[in-house]
């Protein structure tokens, strides 16, 4: 338990020292919309490969598991870990991180009918998301005149237009942003893929899988459609120097490789994996659902192969196997 706890604490300090600053605080202190976007992008650009992957394992696998485990196994560690995990999630300026960090614990509390605790954990997630929306949107924190003054001296002023109007209704605007991201954006970006493949870009025929491309003799960069389609759709942002990805549901990646046959392949592979996982957890249905619900949710915006490896799914299953002897009896 102590090894798990201190490994998280130590890495968070190392990561922030390596970055040299806390991105969230820098964003909060800026009214330059584009500079804030660069703060977010700079996190990935500044990380070396080792830091990048350990951070991914931590935030997507190790921390969610640790928060869930300590929520009942060691309350003292749990109450210390929660604010630390929240701080790290917010510091990296990714709204999905604070939600994913707490989802397993919310699911576990609901299954065990701990509704008060579940509501409290939901509040933590929602509050964290609203804080990030507020910090990354200058128009929610300042008047239009204040923003105009800052943008007048910004290196990105040629891209700035008055369509970014200051808003007095911060809470409502943040709610609208969250609603759009959850219910609209996922389908919208999937539509970009279906519209452009194979009309503009050919089926990848296996070269669109990062792990498989070298075996097939392909250059993955030529078939990395998440980045290629980003450049095709977000032309203005690309001209400004922003780099990004258009991530989509798992089955869309398989479609991009094998067309409609890929949709059948996607369903078969996912069903096979879930069958193996069910056998792995056996009768412990509570932990099966609590641990895996997060990754099943993430399948709506990520490839299965990515979730298994850098997405932290496999390392979470490994942690479960290590800590299984210390867990409570299976929920019935």
Image (cartoon, rainbow, N blue to C red):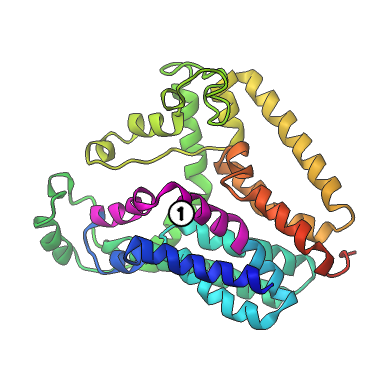
Of the pair 301 and 275, the residue shown nearer to us = 275
Q: Secondary structure at mark 1?
A: helix
Q: Give the residues in magenta.
A: 34-63
Q: Specify the principal SS of the magenta part.
A: helix
Mark 1 nearby-residue class (10 Å; few <14, some 14–19, many ≥20): some
Instruction: Please give left or right for residue 246 compared with residue 259 in the image.
Output: left
From the image, which quarter does the N terminus lie in? bottom right
* Residue 43 occupies quadrant: bottom left
Residue lying at the far bottom in this picture: please name it: 76
Residue bearing the label numbered 1: 51
Q: Is residue 172 visible?
A: no
- Residue at figure coordinates x 83%, y 48% from the top left: 280
Note whether 161 is above or below 234 in the view shown: below
* Residue at 44% over, 65% down: 14
| Image location (x, y in percent) of residue 114 | 75, 74
Residue 62 percent location from the top left of the image? 62, 60
Q: Is residue 49 magenta?
A: yes
Is residue 55 magenta-colored? Answer: yes
Q: Where's residue 88, x and y in %?
A: 47, 67
Q: What residue sits 30% from the left and 56% below the top?
A: 39
- Taking depth in this image into account, of 320 and 223 the one nearest to the observer is 320
Q: Is residue 249 above or below residue 331?
A: above
Q: What residue sits 48% from the left and 17% below the top? A: 198
Query: Quadrant location of residue 326?
Result: bottom right
């Amino acid at each position: 338990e102590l090894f798990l706890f201190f490994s998280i604490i130590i890495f968070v300090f190392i990561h922030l020292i390596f970055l040299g600053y806390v991105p969230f605080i820098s964003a909060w202190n800026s009214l330059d919309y584009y500079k804030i976007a660069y703060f977010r992008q700079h996190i990935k650009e500044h990380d070396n490969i080792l830091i990048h992957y350990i951070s991914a394992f931590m935030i997507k696998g190790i921390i969610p598991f640790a928060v869930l485990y300590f929520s009942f196994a060691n309350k003292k560690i749990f109450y210390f870990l929660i604010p630390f995990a929240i701080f790290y999630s917010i510091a990296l300026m990714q709204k999905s991180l604070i939600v994913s960090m707490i989802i397993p614990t919310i699911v576990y509390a609901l299954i065990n009918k701990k509704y008060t605790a579940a509501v409290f954990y939901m509040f933590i997630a929602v509050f964290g998301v609203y804080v990030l929306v507020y910090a990354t949107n200058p128009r929610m924190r300042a008047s239009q005149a204040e923003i105009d003054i800052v943008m007048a001296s910004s290196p990105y002023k040629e891209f700035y237009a008055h369509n970014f109007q200051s808003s007095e209704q911060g809470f409502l605007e943040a709610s609208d942003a969250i609603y759009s991201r959850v219910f609209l954006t996922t389908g919208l970006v999937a539509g970009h893929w279906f519209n452009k493949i194979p009309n503009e870009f050919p089926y990848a025929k296996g070269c669109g899988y990062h792990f498989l491309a070298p075996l097939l003799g392909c250059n993955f960069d030529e078939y990395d459609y998440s980045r290629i389609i980003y450049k095709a759709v977000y032309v203005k942002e690309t001209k400004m120097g922003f780099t990004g990805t258009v991530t989509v549901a798992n089955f869309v990646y398989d479609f991009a490789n094998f067309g409609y046959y890929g949709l059948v392949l996607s369903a078969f592979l996912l069903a096979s994996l879930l069958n193996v996982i069910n056998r792995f957890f056996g009768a412990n249905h509570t932990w099966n659902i609590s641990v895996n619900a997060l990754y099943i949710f993430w399948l709506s915006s990520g490839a299965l192969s990515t979730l298994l490896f850098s997405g932290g799914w496999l390392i979470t299953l490994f942690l479960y196997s290590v800590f299984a002897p210390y867990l409570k009896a299976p929920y019935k």
